[in-house]
Image (cartoon, rainbow, N blue to C red):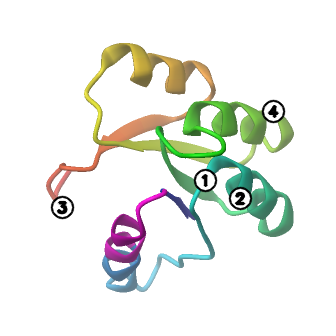
């Protein structure tokens, strides 16, 4: 599942995942509240979660998702290279993080 308030990011990642037969994009959300609701409904294996979003940020959403569903793995997806924000995301339960400007190989 992809969670990002920017439609172009969600669309680009969706197209990227379409290139892999062993990956299935099961849902997209535009904010943390939608992410929690979708996780309750469909139980994705992995969530790529943006940090900064309206209505509920990725840090709060990650904490709630990991408390409710510890089997769901969350990876932070961010354009922010701020160590404090990344640390908060990891403390909330994210498995790791990926910068939006990372290369395909990363």
SS under mark 2: helix
Total labels drawn: 4
Nearer the observer, disc 4 or disc 2?
2
Is 57 left, or right, of 50 in this rendering?
right
Residue closest to the eye, 4 or 103: 4
Q: Which residue is mark 3?
A: 104
Q: Which residue is mark 1?
A: 31
Instruction: Work out how far the residue at label 1 is from the one at label 4, CA to CA, in angstroms.
Output: 18 Å
Pinpoint residue 17: horizontal percent, then vertical percent.
Answer: 38, 76
The crowding category of the residue bearing disc 2, from other C-alpha atoms within 10 Å (few below 14, some 14 to 19, many at least 20), is some
Instruction: Work out how far the residue at label 1 is from the one at label 2, CA to CA, in angstroms.
Output: 6 Å
Instruction: Work out how far the residue at label 4 is from the one at label 2, CA to CA, in angstroms.
Output: 16 Å
Q: Which residue is mark 2?
A: 34
| Mark sitting earlier along the chain (2/3) | 2
| Mark sitting earlier along the chain (1/4) | 1
Is 98 left, or right, of 105 in this rendering?
right
Within the magenta stretch, is there residue 7? yes
Instruction: Work out how far the residue at label 3 is from the one at label 4, CA to CA, in angstroms.
Output: 31 Å
């Amino acid at each position: 599942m992809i969670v990002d308030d920017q439609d172009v990011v969600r669309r680009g990642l969706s197209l990227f995942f379409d290139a892999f037969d062993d990956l299935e994009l099961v849902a997209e959300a535009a904010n943390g509240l939608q992410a929690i609701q979708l996780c309750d409904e469909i139980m994705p294996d992995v969530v790529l979660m943006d940090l900064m979003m309206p209505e509920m940020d990725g840090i709060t959403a990650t904490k709630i998702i990991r408390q409710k569903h510890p089997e769901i793995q969350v990876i932070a997806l961010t354009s922010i290279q701020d160590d404090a924000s990344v640390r908060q995301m990891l403390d909330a339960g994210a498995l790791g993080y990926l910068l939006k400007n990372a290369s395909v190989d990363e």
